[in-house]
Image (cartoon, coloured by chain):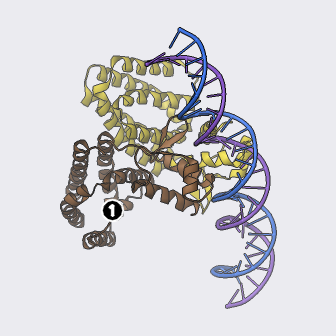
Chain colours: A yellow, B brown, C blue, D purple
Amino acid sequence: MTKASLYQQLKQDIRQGIWPAGAVLNQQKLSDYYQVSRIPVRDALQQLKAEALLVMAGKASLMVPPLTAEEAEELYQIRLQLEPMALRRAFPQLTFSLLGQAEDLLQQIEQDQHLSAADRGALNWQFHLMLYQASHCPHLLRLLHSLHQQVERYLGFQEISLNYADTSHQEHRELLELLRTQQLDAAVALLQQHIQQAGELLTRHLRQQPA
Amino acid sequence: MTKASLYQQLKQDIRQGIWPAGAVLNQQKLSDYYQVSRIPVRDALQQLKAEALLVMAGKASLMVPPLTAEEAEELYQIRLQLEPMALRRAFPQLTFSLLGQAEDLLQQIEQDQHLSAADRGALNWQFHLMLYQASHCPHLLRLLHSLHQQVERYLGFQEISLNYADTSHQEHRELLELLRTQQLDAAVALLQQHIQQAGELLTRHLRQQPA
DNA sequence: CCACTTGGATTTGTATACAAATTAAATTAA
DNA sequence: TTAATTTAATTTGTATACAAATCCAAGTGG
């Protein structure tokens, strides 16, 4: 378990609920669990804290943040502001090659019916990222990546991703088609609708059946 | 030099150019300079890296990011998307008490004519924060705080803040007045203009006279 | 009964020492 | 001369040991 991979592992284990929402993580427990000293654990924790994938609990201890409908809505609202911007700035630099690669990712999602929620989430983000990357906006991409990691914690609910899968796929296809035919404004409108819809579905679910 | 303060100190020293843009920071150098072991230095560096106040230079070393017009523009564009959102979400919860506290900050800026660029920047952000805080959006506030820290590195140029000071003050006053009289849309429009103007001034300056 | 100390147990913070990796220079071959 | 390769120096990564702080529960006074 090397340094970078400990960070990755911890992040994945938080997503997968090994360290559930509300759990207080202490360095000793983690260094025992991952069979490393506290130093690399501290490094990983520090990084996760800075990304808000962990939050302070008391004066010195760290906690896996609870999942709330309010914060989920907030995250989607922020995405709703930033992702259209990313798409607009990427648009002039989008190539058929990139759009093709994005389509490949879609196909991968649709074909492999028995992907884990985590894998589907990762591929879904890769699809969006493929489009946004062309913007060459390092800060924007960094923020979107961070936001997506936050959101991913909420998408463990099988029901959501399954119910929404078909609509989502179709919207992704339409988005690609609009970009291919140079209809930027329509593409942005669709993207906004896409994000808003996903956000509403998630928050509705959270309010009905809190995490 | 305790842990939290080492992080603060390093951040301040980067802003103030003790570790200038492009400088590669190594742990030994910093632990000598700040008279602490490498462990707390590592913690601080890890955090600064996660906030993009430091960036990777090569495989393992960290660098103070260069200042570029492109990134400055990007940062202001992101603020342009997020700050109006923060103001809108704060608006229903804004009280006369908060508006009063915001006004106090303005007065503090205007009265003290010989503030350092850093101090003026800090107070300016506190003014904006006073308004946005009422939104109770933790993620949004965290992002805006981070963005502002990024932007602050660009505002060491005396000419900019001095030239713009008067216009900026007046816009701040107008903003408060619009909020007092419940004119949200006008307030948002002014805020957008305020950010855009500041961004254009900065990027124009950077393109004329690169850092 | 509640708020407030106080003690010990736990947990985090830091220093030092050493291992692993990276960087940069020197050397060699094309 | 240039590019690739090896080697030495530097720098980062990690473990262990100890100091400082925090947390929590038991005890005390109001």
How far from the left and from the top, in percent, is residue A21?
A: 60, 49
Chain letter behind tag 1: B
How far from the left and from the top, in percent, is residue A101?
A: 42, 19
In the picture provided, is B13 more to the left or to the right than B32?
A: left
Amino acid residing under circle 1: Leu
Q: Nearer the viewer, residue A25 or D26?
A: A25
**Residue at image mark 1:** B131
Q: Residue A84: name its quadrant.
A: top left
In the picture provided, is A124 more to the left or to the right than B34?
A: left
Quadrant where the image shows the N terminus of chain B:
bottom right
Asked whether residue B13 appears in the rendered view, the answer is yes
How far from the left and from the top, in percent, is residue B176?
A: 24, 65
| Residue in the image at 71% along x and 41% along y | A34
How far from the left and from the top, in percent, is residue B209?
A: 24, 45
Q: Residue C8: name its quadrant.
A: bottom right
Residue B193 in the image: above or below residue D27? above
| Residue in the image at 37% along x and 20% along y | A99
Q: Residue A132: name its quadrant.
A: top left
Asked whether residue A49 appears in the rendered view, the answer is no
In the picture provided, is B152 more to the left or to the right than B111?
A: right
